[in-house]
Image (tube, rainbow, N blue to C red):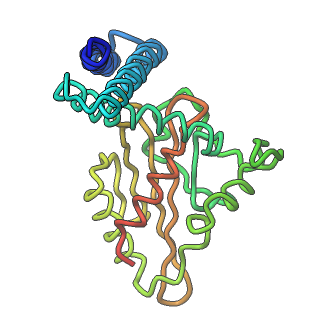
């Protein structure tokens, strides 16, 4: 009985410490107190505490089921559910770090990516040039960025052409999609059929720049392409490609 109760208490204590460390890391990075690297270090500690909470909660659960006893039931259940919820985002981040392409710049048109105009005036840590021929490792092979994007995201990199609406209508639909997604519009030019916006990551508020380009396709149709680039960091853990997917989910063809 003592082990069961101690496990439930330890699990809840570890969970509370993990949550406090996570909140502290996010708040300090957002407020500029810690660097991005410092925030990641604290998040690693918070994730470790979350894993400890989960482990102790499982010990409590095993004891409770084996002994058919309910000591520490409330603490144990809170710790078990809370640790699973808390660990979802950091573990998903690690998972996508292993499975996503090792890039920080994603586009639907690797051969002719949309170019930043208004956002080009901002000098990020990353070069604004999209290097489609840069070599990266994909499925154990050394391939170009363009090839990897086509292979990994075929539904994104296929020509988004043949929209049976004028470029102007497609432009305003794209503009509405950006607003619905909550991205911050930096520049919108109906004349150039271009929308530029920014979006921040959930935890540390890392900024990505987005440009949407609409072009004539055929006699009455239009084509739309996007590009999303992280301002810093060499890996985006799939976040920029996720933004492209979110746009086309929101955009009404």
Residue 22 position, x and y percent, is 32, 20
Q: Quadrant of the N terminus?
A: top left
Residue 233: percent from the left, percent from the top? 55, 29
In percent of width and height, residue 10 lies at 29, 13
Viewer-closest of 209 and 14: 14
Of the pair 15 and 246, the residue shown nearer to us: 15
Seen at 52% across and 43% down, the residue is: 229
Q: Residue at x 53, y 45 (%)?
A: 238
- Res. 155 in view: yes
Where residue 173 sits, quadrant-wise, is bottom left
Q: Where does residue 244 sit, x and y in percent of width and height?
A: 47, 57
Outermost bottom residue: 219
Residue lying at the far left in this picture: please name it. Answer: 74
Quadrant of residue 181 in the image? bottom left
Q: Is residue 197 left or right of residue 64?
A: right
Indicate whether 5 appears above or below 67: above
Residue in view at x 34 percent, y 56 percent? 188
The quarter of the picture where the C terminus appears is bottom left
């Amino acid at each position: 009985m003592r082990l069961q109760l101690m496990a439930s208490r330890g699990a809840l204590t570890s969970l509370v410490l993990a949550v406090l460390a996570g909140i502290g890391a996010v708040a300090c990075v957002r407020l500029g107190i810690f660097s991005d690297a410092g925030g990641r270090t604290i998040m690693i500690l918070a994730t470790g505490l979350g894993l400890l909470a989960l482990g102790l909660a499982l010990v409590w659960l095993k004891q409770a089921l084996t002994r058919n006893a309910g000591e520490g039931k409330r603490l144990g259940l809170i710790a078990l559910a809370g640790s699973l919820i808390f660990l979802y985002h950091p573990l998903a981040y690690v998972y996508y770090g292993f499975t996503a392409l090792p890039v920080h710049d994603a586009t639907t048109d690797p051969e002719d990516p949309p170019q930043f105009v208004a956002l080009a005036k901002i000098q990020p840590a990353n070069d604004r040039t999209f290097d489609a021929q840069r070599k990266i490792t994909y499925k154990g092979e050394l391939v170009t960025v363009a090839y990897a994007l086509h292979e990994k995201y075929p539904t994104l990199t296929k020509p988004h052409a043949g929209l049976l609406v004028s470029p102007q209508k497609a432009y305003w639909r794209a503009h509405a999609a950006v607003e619905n997604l909550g991205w911050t519009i930096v520049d919108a030019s109906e004349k150039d059929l271009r929308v530029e916006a920014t979006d921040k990551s959930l935890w540390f508020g890392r900024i990505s720049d987005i440009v949407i380009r609409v072009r004539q396709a055929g006699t009455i149709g239009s084509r739309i392409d996007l590009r999303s680039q992280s301002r810093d960091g060499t890996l985006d853990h799939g976040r920029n490609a996720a933004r492209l997917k979110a746009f086309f989910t929101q955009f009404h063809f």
